[in-house]
Image (spheres, rainbow, N blue to C red):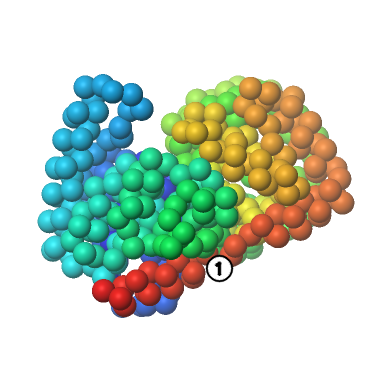
Amino acid sequence: MRVVLTGGGTGGHIYPALAVAREVSRQHPQAAFLYIGSKHGLEAQLVPRTEIPFQSVEISGLKRKLTLDNVKTLWKFFRAVADSKKMLREFRPDVVIGTGGYVCGPVVYAAAKLGIPTMIHEQNVVPGLTNKFLSRSVTKVAVSFSESLAFFPSSKTVLTGNPRATEVMHGNADAGRSFLGVDAGKKIVLIFGGSRGARAINEAVVAMALQLRNFTDTHFVYVTGDVHYEKISAELEQMDDISTNITVLPFVHNMPDVLAATHILVGRAGASTLAEVTALGVPSILIPSPYVTNNHQEKNARGLEKAGAAQVIVERDLTGESLLQALSALLGDANRWEQMKKSSLSLGMPHAATEIVGQLAAIARKK
């Protein structure tokens, strides 16, 4: 099988694509891949580490009002479509899958116009503009949440879940603990603000950092994001009596292993993160980003909260004190933690990547 992957901008779009690639490789060891992204996106950094060949097109997003920039964006789009067609003709894929972000637009559209079987995967409850546009042209639409089904043509849409759910099922808790240097007798709280970090979460953690030493049976893993790491590390080093039960990292590349060892997750409510924690049954304290289109992270998070799998703190209410209180309550109540774990597991779709690859193989055979 020859597969073109596209998706970019944030880890929430890139990691699902890479999870699909790994599942394709497990099922079809001789598969060949090409990833088409933007040279300015995070994918340009992450994809080359996987040894999947990477090519780029130039594209940007449309503004939600009429501006001169939109005229330039449309010109870039059609040029990117032409560039994508050239790449696709050279690679000759059996199927193309897009996992979100502006770059999917020209790549998937070009593939559809060339008659190549295509699929898009929507991670969030409320679809973005790119996937709404592409849904009219693609062969298949896969969604992560049942609530998303109503936004797409029923004849071509299937509920699969998010492929990152399958990815984390291959995580090794012992390997995660070994990487962190944490013994099996301690609980692990993972605090993670997404692939680029989150300033509000970072500020709350710094504000409560001195209090973490009171949790003698817990180790805190604090992932700041690359851009925040040096500043946050310097602030923590200046504190007297800073706790030794905290590990500060800029980024985690072996997230499945770390998540497999995690007792509680504190973080944003991106769709990939929610897929991961529900697949593993990790109770979570979610702080949705208020800066995303359609406020989709809060909509994602409220679903988990309603099911009893998570507690939501909106960013305007987030302080060191409010986060510390939420953690103290959950760490100190084993019965509540167990119930949240069961509720989280009930929402998980651990076979999502397997289902998506099955759908890809099916549409490729119809070519």
Locate residue 26 relative to residue 133 in the image: left or right: right
On the question of residue 137 being in view, the answer is: yes
Image: 243 above or below 108:
above
Position in image of residue 360 (x %, y %): 38, 69
Crowding at mark 1 (Cα within 10 Å: few <14, some 14-19, many 20+): some
Amino acid type, callout 1:
His
Give whichever of 16, 294 is nearer the camera.
Answer: 294
- Residue behind mark 1: 351
| Residue plotted at (14% across, 42% down) | 79
Secondary structure of residue under mark 1 = loop
Position in image of residue 211 (x %, y %): 76, 29
Image: 72 above or below 247:
above
| Residue plotted at (24% across, 58% down) | 112
| Residue plotted at (30% across, 55% down) | 137
Quarter of the image with the N terminus is bottom left
Image: 244 above or below 209:
below
Position in image of residue 25 (x %, y %): 38, 72
On the question of residue 33 being in view, the answer is: no
Position in image of residue 220 (x %, y %): 67, 42
Give whichever of 4, 44 is nearer the camera.
Answer: 4
Locate residue 95 relative to residue 127 in the image: left or right: left
| Residue plotted at (46% across, 37% down) | 196
Quarter of the image with the C terminus is bottom left
Number of on-image labels: 1
